[in-house]
Image (tube, rainbow, N blue to C red):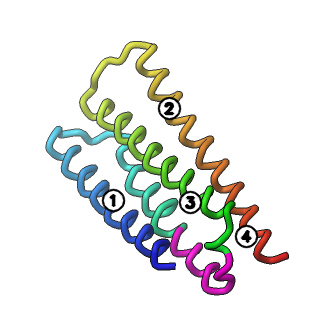
């Protein structure tokens, strides 16, 4: 349980830092348009901090959840995928704010990596559902 709450707190800190970075980086560069940087903050709060707080609540009811091998797989995969997703949003956002011209290949690479991170998050959530289902059988 402590590990889950610590994970939630780490995502809170990262989300807060991402929000400050977004505000200051766009202000410093005089950027007023839409950017992917604004989504880093939200993704880390909702998919990071909030998700692990909800998981902790489930764990209070069913402590055996944290002992399952499927939950351990979820935990590892999710904590690889979410930071990967946040980094790709950060990269896309910095490129947008800087107004950098990307080659088609570089643009496709950023989009591809972001897509892979979303797929991995989806797989991790399916593994979490499997763990939860085992607890309530």
Label 4 close to label 3 by CB (< 8 Å): no
The C terminus lies in quadrant: bottom right
Between 119 and 41, the one lying in front of the other is 119
Q: Nearer the viewer, mark 2 or mark 3?
A: 3
User: Mark 2 = which residue?
Assistant: 113
Q: Main secondary structure of the magenta part?
A: helix
Q: Which range is magenta?
A: 52-64
The residues tagged by marks 4 and 3 sit, at their Cα atoms, a distance apart of 13 Å
Label 1 close to label 4 by CB (< 8 Å): no
The residues tagged by marks 3 and 1 sit, at their Cα atoms, a distance apart of 18 Å
Marks 4 and 2, the one that precedes in the sequence: 2
Marks 1 and 2, the one that precedes in the sequence: 1
Judge left or right: residue 101 versus residue 110: left
Could you tell me which residue is drawn at 23 percent across and 44 percent down? Answer: 26
User: Mark 3 = which residue?
Assistant: 75
Quarter of the image where one finds residue 66: bottom right
The image's mark for residue 14 is: 1
In x, y percent, where is residue 79? 49, 54
Could you tell me which residue is drawn at 32 percent across and 65 percent down? Answer: 13
In x, y percent, where is residue 135? 76, 75
Q: Is residue 21 above or below residue 57?
A: above
Is disc 3 surrounded by few (<14), some (14 to 19) or many (20+) residues within 10 Å? Answer: many
In magenta segment, residue 53: yes
User: Mark 4 = which residue?
Assistant: 132
Q: In the displayed image of the protein, which residue is found farthest to the bottom?
A: 61
The image's mark for residue 86 is: none
Q: Is residue 84 above or below residue 23?
A: above
As helix, strand or loop, the secondary structure at mark 1 comes to helix
């Amino acid at each position: 349980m402590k590990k889950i709450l610590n994970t939630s707190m780490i995502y809170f800190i990262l989300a807060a830092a991402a929000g400050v970075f977004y505000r200051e980086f766009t202000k410093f560069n005089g950027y007023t348009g839409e950017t992917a940087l604004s989504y880093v903050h939200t993704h880390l709060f909702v998919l990071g901090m909030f998700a692990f707080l909800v998981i902790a609540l489930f764990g209070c009811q069913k402590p055996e959840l944290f002992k399952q091998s499927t939950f351990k797989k979820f935990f590892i995969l999710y904590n690889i995928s979410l930071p990967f997703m946040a980094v790709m949003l950060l990269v896309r956002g910095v490129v947008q704010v800087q107004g950098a011209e990307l080659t088609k290949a570089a643009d496709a690479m950023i989009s591809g990596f972001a897509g892979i991170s979303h797929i991995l998050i989806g797989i991790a959530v399916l593994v979490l559902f499997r763990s939860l289902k085992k607890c309530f059988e």
